[in-house]
Image (cartoon, grey):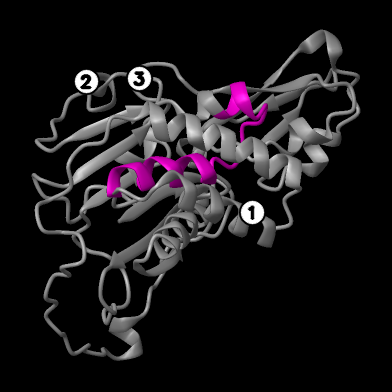
Amino acid sequence: MRFHGRGGQGAKTASRILGTAAFLSGFQAQDAPIYGAERRGAPVAAFTRIARRPIRERGVIAHPDLVVVADASLISDPTAHVMDGIRSDTAVFVNSPLSKSQVWEGGSFPGPIMMLDLTGVALERLGKREAISALLGAVAARVVGVDEASLRGAIGRELTDLGVSAEAIERNQAAADFCYRSLTPAPLPAGSAGQGAKTRLQTPVYESPTLGTAHIGASANSVLRETGGWRTFRPVLIPNKCNGCWLCFAFCPDGVIAMTAEDKPVIDYDHCKGCQICVQECPTHALVAEREQEGAAAWRAK
């Protein structure tokens, strides 16, 4: 199983929840994440293997049986590699309030696709917009056939290790139960459970530093990377609440907030990655978070 999310959505924890739940159900389990830019909102992937016998293989999962996508905008982001290694029988789950045709606008996918608005469930039942790890783990557990009791136990273990309060864990377990029961699971590829595909070993080839390392020839080019595609919630200004304190400008980690001559913030949405620090720091609540949901997908990465 392969999870794709944005930094802060809980894809890594979701993979751990699924692995732990499978282990509690009697499976062998293995999970591991891989990070890219290590910035909030940047594409993140995590991998979970489960089997009835010892798992000898390590590393990334190139040809998954199940792909769980935490944000639909990742599908069109070439740096996320969501579609890599997907076969016609790979089951795909996408967290989105949109329809399948809207998510796959202009494209097609021959395999089974499942949709559920996990972020909407989190907003309604948890009252928060950030990590949806328990809910992602729940839909994955439903698809692979892990029982609910093991899922609840896994959520308890993993969130306790992260320092989450007992009350919040209970709410996450209840929301996860709802998602588990709401999803109609698609079938996994025949024979995938516990079989393990044979992997061809490869010997790495090392190039000289001149050829084998990255080189950036042009300076000051970060502006060309529009990280607005990482955003799942955008900060929006309510002008009459703004007191012009400049705290949003000072706290923005990416320098995407400018101030007008009237001391009002102007947000560069092409580069705002949606970390919401400005929303959290605004003393008058003049900045609020609004979910990205315009158009066929929340945002098309550039």
Q: Which residue is mark 2?
A: 101
**Residue type for callout 3:** Leu
The tag on residue 66 is none
Identify which residue, 238 or 130, lies in the foreground: 130
Q: Secondary structure at mark 3?
A: loop
Across and down, in percent, residue 99 comes to: 29, 19
Relative to 72, say whether 240 is above or below.
Answer: above
The residue range painted magenta reads 122-144
Taken as a whole, is the magenta stretch helix, strand or loop? helix
Identify which residue, 11 or 229, lies in the foreground: 11
Give residue 2's quadrant in the image.
Answer: bottom left
**Residue type for callout 1:** Leu
Q: Is residue 173 left or right of residue 262?
A: left
Q: Is residue 50 left or right of residue 252?
A: left
In space, the residues marked 1 and 3 are separated at their CA atoms by 29 Å
Across and down, in percent, residue 104 comes to: 22, 28
Q: Is residue 71 visible?
A: yes
Q: Which residue is mark 1?
A: 159
Q: Residue at x 31, y 68 (%)?
A: 60
Which circle's residue, 2 or 1, is located before the other in the chain? Answer: 2
Q: Is residue 156 magenta?
A: no
